[in-house]
Amino acid sequence: MVVRSFSLSGGGAAFQRLCIAAASALWIAVLLLMNADGARAAATCTGAPETDVRIRLQIPDVDLIHEKSSGEITQIAGQSKKRFLENDTRLNGFAEFRMQTGHQVSVRQLRPGGPCYYLEDLDIWITVQELRIHIASELPPGSCLYRVTLAHERKHIDIYRESVGQLRDEFRAAIHDGTVLRPISAGDVNAALRRYSTAVGTLLSDLRNRNAQRMTRRNAVLDTPAAYRAEYAQCP
């Protein structure tokens, strides 16, 4: 008997500020859950086939939008940029990013009538849903401020692209450490499915939150009043 479970999560900058400590604590709890029957499972749940693990990453091309005013772009950026702005400063550009992750697990009973179950298939996907650069409509294409603003926002896009690639690699490394792939002893297939799905989902959430915090720190280096002044000083 094979039972499948599907899970999905997504969000933008606000979602990415979730508390790392809480996620990590939950992951520790899941490790304890997976290992609760460790001695019994190690003795009886042997000979499971290797789990088929697939991790997919989809990143779209960047959309360049030159339609909105500086005021509109500042509203789009919202709270994510507010702490970097001085007084009533308006933004000439903004890099918009939104990502969704999800997973599906398939669980199979190791031997008919036995208490052991294993993770037969694991699908993980990382989908970047939005990757956009907004340039204020007040800036003429080819002007100095247009070029400087576009170059700045492209640096943010580079950070997003690199970060989701790192997230994929971190997912792969964490999954293949063996903790969530080991066979378990459970009361029935649905209990096994819940444990596997919870373990995978919590691991992915924890890694995603850590990745998002690193992403935020890297972006913050670019978005300071001093950095903005230095860039604008390039244009007479």
Image (cartoon, rainbow, N blue to C red):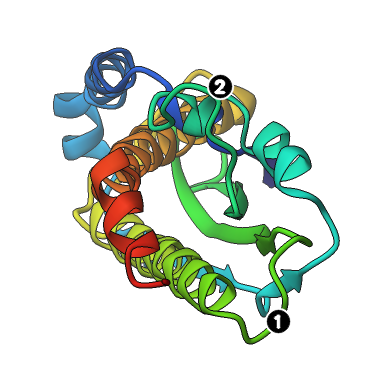
Tag 2: residue type? Ala
Looking at the picture, tell me which residue is in the foreground, 72 or 24: 72
> Residue at the bottom extreme?
142
Mark 1 burial class by Cα count in 10 Å: few <14, some 14-19, many 20+: few
Disc 1, SS: loop
200 left or right of 213 in image:
right
- Residue carrying label 2: 191
Looking at the picture, tell me which residue is in the foreground, 161 or 103: 161
Disc 2, SS: helix
Looking at the picture, tell me which residue is in the foreground, 156 or 195: 156
Residue 125 lies, with reference to residue 84, above or below; the image says below
Looking at the picture, tell me which residue is in the foreground, 168 or 15: 15
Tag 1: residue type? Pro
Q: Give residue 118's position: percent from left, percent from top.
A: 44, 47
- Residue carrying label 1: 141
Residue at 25 percent of width and 33 percent of height: 41
